[in-house]
Image: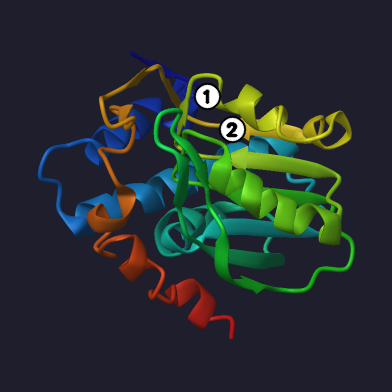
Amino acid sequence: MRTYKNITYDNNGSEIIRTMQVLSEPGVSVERYRNAFYRLGEALGVLLNKKTEGQYGDTMLACASEDADWLAQGVLDALSQKEVSLAVFWNGRITLDAGSHLEYSPIIKSYIEPIKSCQTLILVKSIISTSCVVKTQLTRLISDIQPRKIYIVAPVMYKDADKSLRNEFPASIAEKFEFITFAVDTEKDENQSIIPGIGGMVYPKLGLGNLQNKNKYMPELVKSRL
């Protein structure tokens, strides 16, 4: 079951819902899938502007490499804050316990721009199911940049994913979190994929191949800032 959030008539809600449905459309082309993520990123950026009233201060946006060129780029293009430091992570995925689906997502490599005093950290993710990838990225950043506010932004989240992530951190850190999403899903299939989620494994649907191949991809967003 899916529950939509943060969707109203004044933020073009029907168009956001139609775009969300593209992600789980059978046989969707790579081009349409990428474009849907970009447009959802733009919509999430607009929502962030409203939530913050445009008061970001020194800002960093963090994302996984597979999310950089479409979802994260859309968020960046819509933000009223135009000077934004960037952090991009290439994560692996290791199953520690198949029975409990316990996983670890080590950082294979990273691109992190300097920031003097981070007031706002925006972490962008295509979907938040378990906390492993987001936890790893946040843990890598928090001790270095010490943000005052942390927005965790994704088009889709699994039920209670926000609570699970908060439980991974001390209260002094977890109280900085604010989760922003357009849909909360409550079901998983036999492979533990969220239904409808984002239509399955994101890497091949974005045209990036499997886990190993996607970690060889250098996002255009990163190239443009080198």
Q: Residue furthest bottom?
A: 226
Picture quarter with the C terminus: bottom right
Tag 2–tag 1 contact (CB < 8 Å):
yes
Callout 1: SS: loop
Q: Position of residue 223 (x, y in %)?
A: 50, 82
Observer-side mark, 2 or 1, equals: 2
| Residue at x 86%, y 53% (from the top left corner) | 146
Q: Position of residue 128 (x, y in %)?
A: 49, 36
Q: Position of residue 182 (x, y in %)?
A: 46, 29
Q: Viewed as shown, does residue 54 lie left or right of 19? A: right
Examine the rendering and report whether any part of residue 45 can be seen.
no
Identified by mark 1, the residue type is: Asn
Q: Position of residue 8 (x, y in %)?
A: 47, 21
Callout 2: SS: strand
Q: Residues within 10 Å of mark 2 (few under 14, many from 20)?
A: many
Q: CA distance from mark 2 to mark 1?
A: 8 Å
Q: Please tell me in which quadrant of the rendered image residue 106 appears.
A: bottom right
| Residue at x 56%, y 20% (from the top left corner) | 160
Residue 172 vs 89, above or below: the answer is above
Q: Which residue is mark 2?
A: 180
